[in-house]
Amino acid sequence: MAKRNRRDGVGQAGQSLPPRVVVPPRTAKRFLGCGIPGVNPEDLTGRLIVVEGVDGSGRSTQIARLVHWLEGCGHATVQVGLKRSSLVSEELELAKQGNILGHITMSLFYATDFADQLENIMLPALKAGFMVLADRYIYTPMVRDLVRGLDEDWLMNLYGMAVVPDAVFYLNVSSEELVQRNFAKNHTLDYWESGMDLGLSRDMFDSFVKYQALVRRQFRRLATTHGFTLVDGEQSVEAVTEELQRKIESMLQGSEPCSKAVNVH
Amino acid sequence: MKQTFAELGFPGRLLAVEGLDGSGKSTQIHLLQRWLELQGLKVFFSEWNSSDLVKAATSKGKRRHLLSPTTFSLIHATDFADRYERQLIPLMRAGYLVLCDRYVFTAYARDTVRGCPEAWVRGLYGFAALPDLTFFLNAPLEVSEARIRDRRQEPKYFESGMDLRLSSDPHESFRMFQGRLLEQYLAMSTEFGFLVLDASLPVEAQQSVLRQLVAARIGLESFHVSKR
């Protein structure tokens, strides 16, 4: 599961670091809804830090830099993301390629993938006091499903098994900038990231722009109801990391709560 | 409150058969299907846990014992959703008689016995309409267990609820697990208006009751295959 850092990350080789490691205060977790049978959220003493944002928003780069930094500070980390479960990730990839599954089925398939990682990676790590870094969490699948017309109450019940994160950072990048970054990286637009299954337009570029606007609208709505911290993803890579570090640092010192997530139920 | 397909205005009708493993569901549903087909009616049969794409993941999870109560529940809901979206709904719109070997009640019973919150499980299946008729084949535990025992030596891992660690003996675990499922089914019986059949009667006696109930409650004449 653990992903190697792809970039140099933060801090220079040879730089001297203080040996004292800050022990963050224990905070209680809670579940978004029903939770997982037999799991007491009070046993989850680690921290769950989520970075959300569409493809090209710089998520993975920032996660890698945060891991580097957190480990340098003496915190044990674990990374999770979408479609990484041992249970269904292969089948989910096949389903995406074939483009044959209905919206509800796709949604439940993603939720199965999430639940498998939640139970086998996130919960054990949180119990052991790790910093769990999620390269997207339940919000990306929820947003995709909302854009496809699924019922919000149904989704909230479905993801009631999820742990409410300590912080959710949403990397905000404009559609214009996203188009440029996607082309710079792949020279092509992704079928799903362009929402081609929705029939918004036969033209992929048009569809991408329209779809991303719908996604952004849903993310902004969830940002309010679930207390995301919005981060300007168009700053330099270093500036984004610094902003994230500042916010995580204050969260770990317990001086100011980073996420004001509200329980919708 | 959930509605049936008829109440939702679908031209098709969905008939579900529920019951414990070894209660004789497959036998009864097969004979019912034959009877309907021989009358030239539009019939389709759909089985629990049979969507090709999802089944690969389910089998892997079961074989390697990777499933927790939550993922067991979710993967079966995914399978059901796939059949629901791609088969059941289109056929119901096309005016078919759809026969389901197990429906959402199987999940309600199994998943809650495994410890998933009832409200969560029922919520997962919130997208599914209720069957127009639901038959429950009520077999005493000894009968269903004897049938399973005759078919193969050991009950399967998840089928006997071995994951719940009720007992290390598969047969003992099977009995305890099926007993809890039976309690769940009987508790749902009134709520969802199950038509309860005595599954310890001879096959023909059960089939006779089944056919009479279907004939009395479904206007079969409107399901003829169009003649051209």
Image (tube, coloured by chain):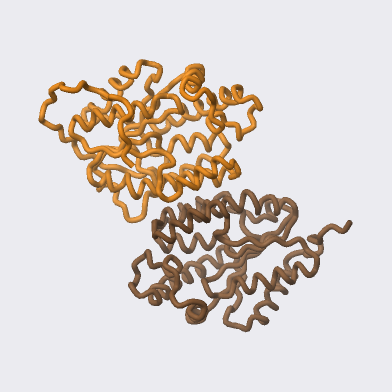
Chain colours: A orange, B brown
Q: Position of residue B126 (x, y in %)?
A: 55, 50
Q: Position of residue A48 (x, y in %)?
A: 30, 37
Q: Position of residue B115 (x, y in %)?
A: 39, 60
Q: Is residue B28 above or below residue A22?
A: below
Q: Is residue A231 above or below residue A52?
A: above
- Is residue A154 visible in this depiction of the protein? no
Q: Position of residue A198 (x, y in %)?
A: 61, 33
Compared across the picture, whether B181 is left or right of A122 comes to right
Q: Is residue B105 above or below residue A123?
A: below
Compared across the picture, whether A23 is left or right of B146 comes to left
Residue under the point 68% across and 51% down: B8
Q: Is residue A260 above or below residue B107?
A: above
Residue under the point 43% across and 28% down: A53
Along the viewing direction, whichever of B200 and A16 lies nearer the viewer: A16
- Quarter of the view holding residue B209: bottom right
The quadrant the C terminus of chain B occupies is bottom right
Compared across the picture, whether B2 is left or right of B98 comes to left
- Is residue B14 visible in this depiction of the protein? yes
Residue under the point 27% across and 44% down: A126
Compared across the picture, whether A117 is left or right of A175 comes to left
Question: For the view shown, which residue lies furthest in the left direction?
Answer: A19
Along the viewing direction, whichever of A156 and A55 lies nearer the viewer: A55
